[in-house]
Amino acid sequence: MHSISQLEKQQVGLRLPKYLVEEIDAFTTQFSINRTDVIIEAISSYISEQKANIFYSNFDAGCKELKNTLTSNTTNSLKSLDELIDELEH
C-alpha cells in the first residue's frame, strides 16, 4: 500500500507518438475516462509485469542452481533438499 504522500500527483512531461495519443483519446472517449488514468494504469501494469518477470527469472535461476547442486558429485551425494539445507546449516 502507498502512503498519502506517495499518492500525491506530480506533473511529468512526456512526448508520445501521435498515433498513440490518438489511440489513447479514442479509448478515453469510448470509456469516459481521462488520459492520465489510462497512462497511470498502463505504466503500473507494465511495472508490475516487469517485476514479475524478474522474480520468475530469478526463481528459475535459483531452481536450476539448486538442481545442479543436488546432482553435482561435489556435494557429497546429497539426495534431497532437506539434506542440502542440513548441510548448509552445519
Image (tube, rainbow, N blue to C red):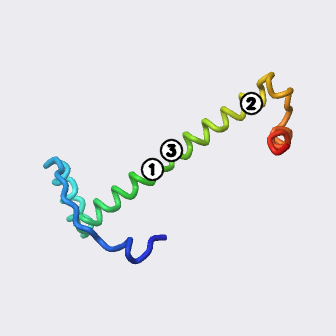
Mark 2 highlights which residue?
69
Residue 54: which disc?
3
* Residue for point 50% across, 44% down: 54
5 versus 29 height, above or below: below
First-in-chain label (1 vs 2): 1
Q: Residue furthest bottom?
A: 4
Q: Nearer the viewer, residue 39 or 81?
A: 81
* Residue for point 32% across, 62% down: 40
Q: Residue furthest top?
A: 73
Q: Position of residue 12 (x, y in %)?
A: 22, 61
| Image-based side of 85 in relation to 25, left or right | right
Mark 1 highlights which residue?
49
First-in-chain label (1 vs 3): 1
Measured in 3D between alpha carbons, the distance from the residue under mark 1 to the one under mark 3, in whole angstroms, is 9 Å
First-in-chain label (2 vs 3): 3
Determine which quarter of the picture holds residue 67: top right
In this view, the mark in front (2 or 3) = 2
Determine which quarter of the picture holds residue 22: bottom left
Determine which quarter of the picture holds residue 42: bottom left
